[in-house]
Image: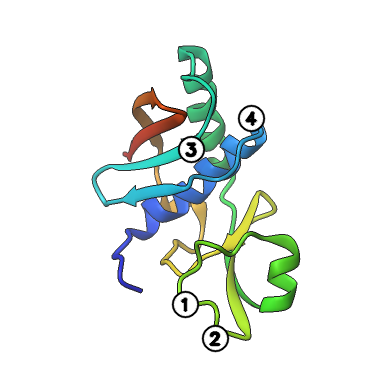
C-alpha cells in the first residue's frame, strides 16, 4: 500500500462514507486525502449541504463512533465481492482471487487495503471543519479530537 493512512482517520472515512450514503443517498466518496491531522472526502453531489445537514452528518458519525463497533477484516472471494461492492478503486485487484473487506460492526462494509482501528472507540470524535461545493463536487473536510 503506497498511502500511509492514519488508522483512526481511515476508519472515520468509512463511517463518513456510509453516513453520506444513508443520509443523502449518494455514493461513497470518489476521492479522499486522509491525513493524521485533517482529512477530506469529495462526493459527486448536486448542491452544498445546509448547516443543519452538516450538524446532522457530524452527529450521526459521532453516534456510530460511540457505539464501539468492532472493526473486522475478512478475506472474501473476488467473485463474491464483485456481487456486492464496486471494486474500481481497489488497486491491483485484477490478479487477486480474494479481496479484503473491512466491516465496521453492522454499519459499514467495503473493500479496502488500508489500516484501521480494531474498534471505533479508539477514534475519538469527528469535527467537520468546512464544506465546499463546486462543479458538482461536495468537499467535506474533517479532523478528529
Q: Is residue 98 above or below residue 115?
A: below
What is the C-alpha distance between the residues marked 2 and 1? 7 Å
Q: Point out the frontmost of discs 1 and 4.
A: 1
What is the C-alpha distance between the residues marked 4 and 2? 35 Å
Q: Residue at x 50, y 52 (%)?
A: 120
User: x%, y% of residue 98?
Assistant: 62, 82
What is the C-alpha distance between the residues marked 1 and 4? 31 Å
Residue at mark 1: 92
Q: Nearer the viewer, residue 30 or 1?
A: 30
Q: Mark 1: which secondary structure? A: loop
Q: Is residue 118 left or right of residue 142?
A: right
Decide: few, some or many residues near mark 4? Use Cα within 10 Å; few <14, some 14-19, many ≥20.
Answer: few
Query: Where does the C terminus fall, quadrant-wise?
Result: top left
Find out whether the residues at labels 2 and 1 contact each other: C-beta distance under 8 Å.
yes
Decide: few, some or many residues near mark 3? Use Cα within 10 Å; few <14, some 14-19, many ≥20.
Answer: many
Find out whether the residues at labels 1 and 4 contact each other: C-beta distance under 8 Å.
no
Residue at mark 2: 95
Residue at mark 4: 23
Amino acid at each position: 500500500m503506497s498511502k500511509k493512512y492514519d488508522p483512526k482517520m481511515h476508519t472515520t472515512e468509512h463511517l463518513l462514507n456510509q453516513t453520506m450514503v444513508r443520509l443523502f443517498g449518494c455514493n461513497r466518496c470518489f476521492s479522499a486525502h486522509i491525513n493524521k491531522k485533517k482529512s477530506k472526502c469529495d462526493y459527486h453531489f448536486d448542491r452544498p449541504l445546509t448547516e443543519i445537514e452538516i450538524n446532522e452528518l457530524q452527529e450521526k458519525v459521532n453516534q456510530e463512533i460511540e457505539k464501539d463497533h468492532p472493526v473486522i477484516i475478512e478475506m472474501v472471494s473476488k467473485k463474491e465481492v464483485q456481487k456486492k461492492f464496486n471494486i474500481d478503486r481497489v488497486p491491483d485487484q485484477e490478479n487477486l482471487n480474494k479481496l479484503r473487506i473491512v466491516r465496521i460492526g453492522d454499519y459499514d462494509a467495503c473493500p479496502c487495503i488500508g489500516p484501521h482501528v480494531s474498534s471505533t472507540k479508539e477514534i475519538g470524535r469527528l469535527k467537520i471543519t468546512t464544506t465546499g461545493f463546486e462543479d458538482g463536487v461536495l468537499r467535506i473536510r474533517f479532523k478528529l479530537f
